[in-house]
Image: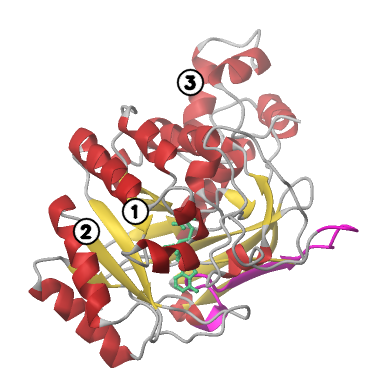
């Protein structure tokens, strides 16, 4: 079945055969620009509305939603047509409205401190499943407008490159959220970053650095074993040069692990030449990771020490932590574990992370017992 937001404009034209030509544009704009359900498109004939509703079903079924921060943060748990589960978070701030979307059900990157990484990978989302999360958020946020979309929910956007990029194009061109308000966040899949340099839409790039030497980064972000820092930094430099967009580094501060003075020094050494902005995130606790986040005072000192070395840094405002909607914390529906599937958790010591090539479909699919994801928006502390 073709999902509503997977259908191309040609699919829509096929569906509207026999109708006047202008109906195609009308419907397309209703779906995307106005984020309306066909049933709400009172400018379409009644029978046509019903036909479109039936022919182009929504792919996300709301399982639950929770709100926090006095209603300013909304977290959804969705079930997809095959039972996979993903989550989306809407965050309303005084000056902007941000939606954080998932690009995969689960994640194969296996970062030990991230609840999604602990749970493992299930499958890539389709373009329409990513776009639909934004449409739901747009409808919920009314009368406010969604201004920003961050691809920082469950999954690794650059390991699901084509579908993620398809969503970027739809959001920019059809929904009308400019590329400069879209941010892709990656563990650092170098071929994916290099592919981005060839795209015509300049999105913001966030790289989840968390460590600025290979030994430490190998242990925190297993994908570093495949794409070590020198390769990653070079790719980031190319992206900044060709896109003209700001690069940011994400740094989840872990007590006694990556919050030393030497970490500040190393991080500043990487960030300064790239004019990268650093987002310091106090690590949010997750069940599968034993180390705590750095104390608040250390978070502040870390940021100040970066600034003193000429690196712009902000501490992310935590949103939704009371509903487990903060980075790395969201716990989705429990999946039944398929017989014989590997237990959720980090890969065996020394083994590389499960790898997914940027343009390939899902590899090494496994079912996992729980899906969790981490989400947050950036803001000043
Ligand atoms: N796979 C992508 C996007 C999803 S994670 C990526 O890694 O960038 C979004 C951000 O949340 C990443 O920077 C990730 O490292 C961070 N994160 C994950 N778990 C976290 C936790 N427990 N506390 C704080 N940040 C976390």
Looking at this view, is 201 or 305 the one in front? Answer: 305
Q: Quadrant of the N terminus?
A: top right
Please report the residue visible at 84 percent of the width from the left and 62 percent of the height from the top: 337
Q: Is residue 313 left or right of residue 222?
A: left
Do the residues bearing badges 2 and 1 touch, measured as CB atoms within 8 Å? Answer: yes
Looking at the rendered structure, which numbered label has been put on residue 229? 1
**Mark 2 burial class by Cα count in 10 Å: few <14, some 14-19, many 20+:** some
Residue 33 in sight in this render = no
Q: Are marks 3 and 1 in contact (CB under 8 Å)?
A: no
First along the sequence among labels 3 and 1: 3
Q: CA distance from mark 3 to mark 1?
A: 46 Å
- 225 left or right, relative to 356: left
Q: Position of residue 148 (x, y in %)?
A: 35, 52
* Majority SS type along the magenta span: loop
Q: CA distance from mark 2 to mark 3?
A: 47 Å
Q: Secondary structure at mark 3?
A: helix
The magenta span reads 322-341
Q: Is residue 348 left or right of residue 218?
A: right
Colour scheme employed for the rendering of this structure: secondary structure
Can residue 266 be seen here? The reply is: yes
Residue assigned mark 3: 25
């Amino acid at each position: 079945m073709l999902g509503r937001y997977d259908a191309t404009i040609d699919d829509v034209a096929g569906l509207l055969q026999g109708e006047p030509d202008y109906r195609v544009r009308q419907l397309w704009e209703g779906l995307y620009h106005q984020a309306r359900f066909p049933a709400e498109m009172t400018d379409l004939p009644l029978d046509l509305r019903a036909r479109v509703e039936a022919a182009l079903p929504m792919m996300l079924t709301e399982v639950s939603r929770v709100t926090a921060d006095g209603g300013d943060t909304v977290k959804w748990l969705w079930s997809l047509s095959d039972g996979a589960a993903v989550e989306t978070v809407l965050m309303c701030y005084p000056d902007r409205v941000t939606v954080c979307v998932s690009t995969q059900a689960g994640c194969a990157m296996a970062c030990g401190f991230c609840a999604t990484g602990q749970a493992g990978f299930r499958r890539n989302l389709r373009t329409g499943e990513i776009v639909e999360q934004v449409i739901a958020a747009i409808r919920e946020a009314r009368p406010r407008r969604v201004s920003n979309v961050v691809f920082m929910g469950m999954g690794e956007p650059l390991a699901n490159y084509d579908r993620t990029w398809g969503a970027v194009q739809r959001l920019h061109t059809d929904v009308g959220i400019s590329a400069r308000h879209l941010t892709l966040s990656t563990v650092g899949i170098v071929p994916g970053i290099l592919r981005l340099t060839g795209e015509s839409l300049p999105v913001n790039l966030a790289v989840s650095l968390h460590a600025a030497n290979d030994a430490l980064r190998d242990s925190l972000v297993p994908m570093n074993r495949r794409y070590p820092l020198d390769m990653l930094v070079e790719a980031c430099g190319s992206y900044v040069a060709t896109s003209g967009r700001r690069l940011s580094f994400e740094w989840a501060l872990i007590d006694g692990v990556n919050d030393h003075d030497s970490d500040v020094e190393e991080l500043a050494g990487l960030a300064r030449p790239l004019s990268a902005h650093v987002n310091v995130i106090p690590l949010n606790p997750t069940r599968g990771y034993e180390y705590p986040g750095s104390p608040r005072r250390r978070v502040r000192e870390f940021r100040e020490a970066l600034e003193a070395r000429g690196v712009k840094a902000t501490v992310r405002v935590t949103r939704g932590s009371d509903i487990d909607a903060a980075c790395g914390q969201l716990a989705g529906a429990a999946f039944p574990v398929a017989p014989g599937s590997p237990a959720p958790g980090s890969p065996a010591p020394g083994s590389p992370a499960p790898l997914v090539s940027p343009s390939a479909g899902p590899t090494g699919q496994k079912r996992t017992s729980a899906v969790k994801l981490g989400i947050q928006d950036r803001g000043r502390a």
